[in-house]
Amino acid sequence: MDALSRSLPALLAVVVLLAGCGEPEPEPIPHLDLILLRGTVVDGTGAPGRVEDVGVLDGRIAAMGDLSEATADERIDVTGLTVAPGFIDMHSHAELTEDYGRDARPFLAQGITTVVMGVDGGGTHEVGARLRSWADEGIGVNALTYVGHGHVRREVMGMDDRAPTPEELDAMRALVRRGMEEGALGLSSGLFYTPGFYATTDEVIELGLVASEWEDAIYDTHDRDLGATYQGVGYDASVAEGIQIGAESGLRVIFSHFNPQGATNRGRADVGIALIEDARLRGLEVAAAQHPYTATQSNLRAYALPRWAAAGGPDAIARRFADRDTSRILQRQIVESLAMRGGPDKILFADADPRLNGKTLAQVVAEWGSSVPRTVERILRENGNATVMNLELYDAENTRLLARQPWMMTCTDGRTPAEGQTVTHPRVYGAFPQKMRMYALDSDDISVALAVRSMSGLAADFLRLEDRGRLAPGSWADIAVIDLLTYRSSATYTDPHRYADGVRHLLVNGTFAIRDGEFIDARAGMALRNGGTPVSPAASATP
């Protein structure tokens, strides 16, 4: 236990000591670093807002209530503003290991102070090294990570479309165990993607059983088929599979960016809701996260290529295109796969490649004077991971219904854009204010208190972060001070590089990351092990 944790009882003004006469007397409030005065506190529990002061000392919330008599180094009047816990992005692709992404500004501007990484099955098994690098380099937000099923399968089996041998399964178990020992939250999967798609349900359960040896471990899944997977299992079966994996492995389940996809699933969110509700009634802990946009973002290979054709990796893909008979089948299935997604007009490139960025696949086909399949082939040959958005794949009414669910959290699913990505998905800049505006401020689908809870306390509860996600004495001072009148996303699909408006002040572990609407590059985020234990930077580690 560190010195700060040992000193916490002395810092909490809410602690009541019993005097000799039996009457309670409040402990004196210590001199504070900062007091936020007279804000409307929406504390992340789902309770309505209330006007009170919040006092910060040594990176934590030390006192709440009427602090008019307390002393502090600094007092900021936040009358008329909403004071909320820093938001938690439950499915993030923040580029915290890259120079251009460590400050996490697109996330901070939304009020996000914690991100969950290693999602879609991509989390490294070298969790300790990842956490230490974040701690040593400095990051703008707190970060946790999963170990990824797809990653460990690729490490052991490459891109093979087959079942593992017993020896290979043991090797994958060992990598999952290493990730968990080094601080992973649990196991993530991307069964929509290759090589995860090639795994059976039983394979994932076997690896989940390893992760479940750790108390409260999680199974986070981009499940196999949200409804627009070519030759997939269908939305209903995909959700059922995710629940089965959790039930049989003993892991708690969260569905990533949960929303049925495609024209055939419009108005069918109630199907997924019913499956989750049934699981919860059976005693399983199952939840989900969402962003409010109708477009997805992934890579062209995942959207255009049937899964059998991706087996073996880029060289094998090239051989299939070169074989006349195989190529004929492949060209037909590329067209069919894209048709499920609305056709080439709905595939918009968000890649750094200037030949592609900001253009639809249909426009590139016209510019290159080629067919759709041959254009896809050329792009995959030259840029196997070309980033694309799929416009209008989600149904807005499905999203609205899902936002009302008490187990629905919030995510960006956003990746920090690299230099050259003129067009990228606006969700990386605006998912949280967009959800708040659409469903709480500009409509009455949910209350502001429930919206805040979906963005903070609910996520902290699920992640078992006892000292984050709520405004309460003893919690880390991850605090967002927001002007709800101006809190909104300015990012669009054609002009995405616009920071969200309305976050007046933002504290990460008690340090300003935004003050008076301006960024302060403090990089005060912490790398967190499962359970929320911070990883110390090497420079401050005890020899």
Image (spheres, grey):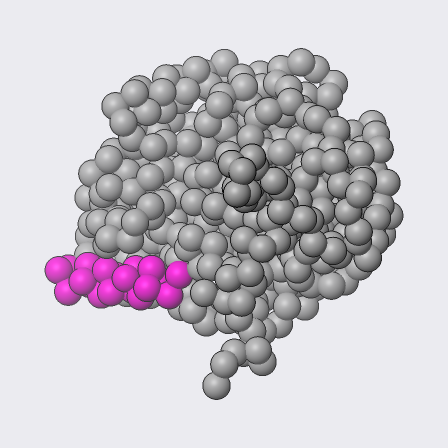
Percent across and percent down for residue 354 are 73, 56
Q: Residue at x 15, y 59 (%)?
A: 165
Magenta extent: 165-183
Tell me if residue 128 comes above or below residue 511 in the rendering. Answer: below
**Residue 176 falls inside the magenta stretch:** yes
Task: Report the magenta stretch's main SS.
Answer: helix
Residue pushed farthest front?
21
Instruction: Compare residues 217 and 372 and report the one nearer the observer.
Output: 217
- x 33%, y 60%: residue: 180
> Which residue is more in the foreground, 288 or 337?
288
Where is 195 relative to 361, above or below? below
Which percent across, then down, holds residue 391? 62, 32
> Would residue 56 be found to the left or right of residue 504 on screen?
left
Write down the quadrant of residue 38 in the picture. top right
Q: Residue furthest left?
A: 166
Q: Position of residue 200 (x, y in %)?
A: 23, 44
In this view, the residue in front, 167 or 70, is: 70
192 sits left or right of 450 in the view:
left
Q: Residue at x 70, y 26 (%)?
A: 50
Q: Residue 307: within the magenta?
A: no
In the rendered view, does 454 fall on the left or right side of 105?
A: left
Q: Is residue 521 visible?
A: yes
Q: Is residue 366 visible?
A: no
The quarter of the picture where residue 486 lies is top right
